[in-house]
Image: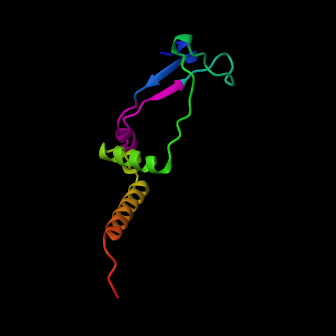
Amino acid sequence: MIVAKDLKSVVCVKPKLDNPRIIRQDGAFFIFGINNKKTLPANIPVKYHVTTEPYRLIINKSGKSKILGQLATLGINEASMFPEIDSVSKYIKQKLKNELTKASSGRKKPRR
């Protein structure tokens, strides 16, 4: 049954876990309703408005790789977020490349 007031509100939907990406992301979606006109966004009640001032967080290059490493330790990486074959293969290729780079930088060059 469709309730008219629901068409004007914002609803959080937890999807059916029948897709590898949705399962890995363990996500939910927001569906924004419409007002009397489709071109106008739904009204979000004031109690849900964020009251803090937005701020920008700048992460330098070395910090980015450290954060990505910490996320990978928790099992959060490109392959887990996007389990399609192209993303997984890209992730494995990059991980192998990084490991080979580390291994080769640790070796001493042979003397001539």
* Residue at left offset 38%, top offset 39%: 25
In reply to whether residue 16 is colored magenta, the answer given is: yes
Residue 109, horizontal then vertical, whole percent:
34, 78
The foreground one among 12 and 72 is 72
| Rendering colour mode | rainbow
Q: Position of residue 80 (x, y in %)?
A: 36, 47
Query: In the displayed structure, does residue 11 sit left or right of residue 110?
Result: right
Q: Quadrant of residue 107?
A: bottom left
Q: Range of the magenta residues?
A: 15-31
57 left or right, relative to 13: right
- Choose between 42 and 6: the one closer to the eye: 42
> Is 11 drawn above or below residue 104 in the view shown?
above
Residue 108 part of the magenta-drawn span = no
Residue in the picture at 42% in, 54% down = 87
Rendered residue at 34%/47% (across/down): 72
Number of marks in the rendered image: 0
Instruction: Find the residue positioned furthest to the bottom.
Output: 112
- Left/right of residue 64 with respect to residue 102 in the rendered view: right
Image coords of residue 76 (percent x, y)? 35, 44
Which quarter shows the C terminus?
Answer: bottom left
Residue 61, image x and y in percent?
A: 49, 50
When the figure is inspected, residue 61 is found, relative to residue 22, above or below; the finding is below
Closer-to-camera residue (112/107) = 112
Q: Residue furthest front?
A: 111
Q: For residue 21, what is the image quadrant? A: top left
